[in-house]
Amino acid sequence: METALKLNVNGEVRQVLAPANHSLLEVLRERCGLTGTKHGCELGECGACTVLLDGEPVLACLVLAVECEDRRVETVEGLSNGAALHPLQQAFADLGAAQCGYCTPGMLMTAKALLDSNPLASEMEVREALAGNLCRCTGYWKIVEAVQWAGRMSTGDMVPPQCLRERNAAGGCSHG
Amino acid sequence: MKNFDWITPATPEAAVQAAAQAGRAFLGGGTDLLPLMKSGLREPTGVVQLKGLTGMERLELTADGITIGASITLAALCTDTLVQRSLPAVFDAARHAATPLVRNRATVGGNLCQRPRCWYFRHPDYACSKKGGDTCYAIEGENKFHAIFDNTTCNIVHPSNLGPAFWAHDAVVVVLGPKGERRIPVAEFWVRPEEDMRTEVALEPGELITSVSCKPLSGRSGSAFEEVNEKQSYDWGLVACAARLTLDGDKASDVRIVIGAVAPVPLRREAAEAVLNGKVPNEAAAWAAADAAIAGATPLRDNAYKVTMLRACVKNAILTAAARARKS
Ligand SMILES: Cc1cc2nc3c(=O)[nH]c(=O)nc-3n(C[C@H](O)[C@H](O)[C@H](O)COP(=O)(O)OP(=O)(O)OC[C@H]3O[C@@H](n4cnc5c(N)ncnc54)[C@H](O)[C@@H]3O)c2cc1C
Ligand code: SF4
Ligand code: FES
Ligand code: FES
């Protein structure tokens, strides 16, 4: 049996029909046509399906859609403002933080939640926040750098990436 | 995942009433129930949502100690200053569990009731003893992550980080069932495979954990939870230990040492506690207690490494608890 659900996705109210056994991931991808959120392990282990639920990063594969009625869901599709990329998207593109891109939507959403509360997160804070998002391509450090860079850009600290690298390594950089 | 009735009660009593019908399951954060349902290991006909039930999201100091509602998430536990100050082993245990994304949803009640991670158990094609068959595949098969104690019937290790930490704080699990409320001391909460192969916890069908009450630190005391993982970012512990002690002058008293991830249920090591009680909890005493904690281990083909690792883990947990007690 299908239930009528009212979901608030990226600020838009959507009425969907879905059975109780559908995960939020299935409903987003198959009923809302929002395929930016990726389907990985389905078991909570990879983070590819990360979305924000009331501002908090959660694994959409382990949330039932029926639990999300009248709650705020944010997906990667809601990040950019029209053609203007979100600072995180810009930083991932500029710093080569995405290769195959499969982990990227989940990384971006976890990182968004972190930067919303802590834009100047340290390297360790970024690594800790992203501990549940696996990436098989990049080796992570470009991702960590892109997240830090995006946070700093959004607060007006236009630190060039090479300085960020030196700051992380030495607690300061030659440019002050 | 098979379809089911979706039930959203408003009170713990209504949830218990809803679960009285056979085939229904409580849903906390869903981080274990949903994977089990996806692999067909559980097929409830009705799922009873626990989110928002009155009283199950409180975290406060009461006459019973610190009362932690069963729907409190691991993320809330490991960011709470009362827990950090008064139940440091619980704080550490929650912080080390899983990933931030899992911790945002995983609840205390679900953590205690999660099922084993044994790969034969999780694989739908192996009808092992725990699933009603007559063989434990881990005895002769791949047993790198399995038990090094009490491992003749079923070799699972209990995966809960909170289990040993709650025990170190003399926890009581408060349970509501069709016949009313029961208070189960955490020592009696665990069920060994020899007692009942089908479960790991002493809950009757349809019983709901509403809260867990823990004894807070008092006087000059400290507690800690340590684990060793294959991978730091997230992983179930290979070995774990929760320790608590009080300083009487410079000597340890009222010691608790509980080990995890090494037996089908958490194990309190009273012999190790006896070694440490009355001694200055320095490195030598911590190693001596650790030796007592690993005594009697019966490792399997692939997991002898756990014995050495557990010894160091117990020593570290004791030294961290002692250092915290000295600072208190
Ligand atoms: C990638 C990953 C890594 C993990 N690593 C760790 C780790 O290192 N350490 C660790 O401890 N855990 C770990 N876990 C397990 C995780 O902590 C548990 O899945 C979680 O705590 C379960 O809580 P939940 O609220 O999601 O439970 P649910 O999935 O909702 O429920 C689990 C079971 O408990 C029952 N239940 C839930 N609440 C109650 C209640 N109040 N009363 C009675 N029964 C109840 C349910 O019916 C179900 O049978 C990991 C999980 C994942 C996915
Ligand atoms: S250890 Fe237990 S759960 Fe694993 S195969 Fe043996 S009987 Fe089954
Ligand atoms: S698909 Fe959800 S965690 Fe992997
Ligand atoms: S870019 Fe390929 S998995 Fe991360």
Image (cartoon, coloured by chain):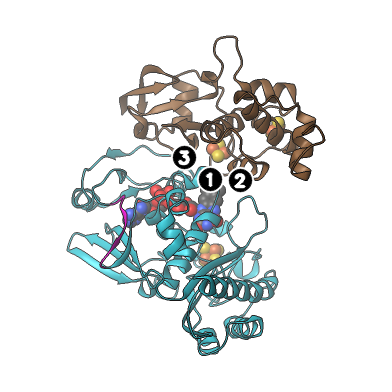
> Does the CB distance between marks 1 and 3 fall below 8 Å?
no
Q: Looking at this rendering, what residue extends furthest in the top direction?
A: A83
- The chain carrying label 3 is A
Q: Is the residue marked 3 within 8 Å of ligand 3, measured from its CB?
A: yes
Where residue A130 appears, x then y in whole percent? Answer: 61, 40
Q: Which chain is cyan?
A: B
- Colour of chain A in the image: brown
Where residue A58 appears, x then y in whole percent? Answer: 48, 37
Where residue B132 appears, x then y in whole percent? Answer: 44, 63
Q: Are marks 1 and 2 on the same chain?
A: no
Q: Which mark is residue B100?
A: 1
**Mark 1 belongs to which amino acid?**
Pro
Q: What residue is drawn where x is 38% and y is 66%?
A: B201
Q: Is B86 placed left or right of A82 in the picture? A: left
The local crowd at label 3, few if under 14, some if 14 to 19, many if 20 or more residues have their Cα within 10 Å, is many
Q: Earlier in the sequence, mark 3 or mark 2?
A: 3
**Spatial distance from mark 3 to mark 2, Cα to Cα?**
21 Å
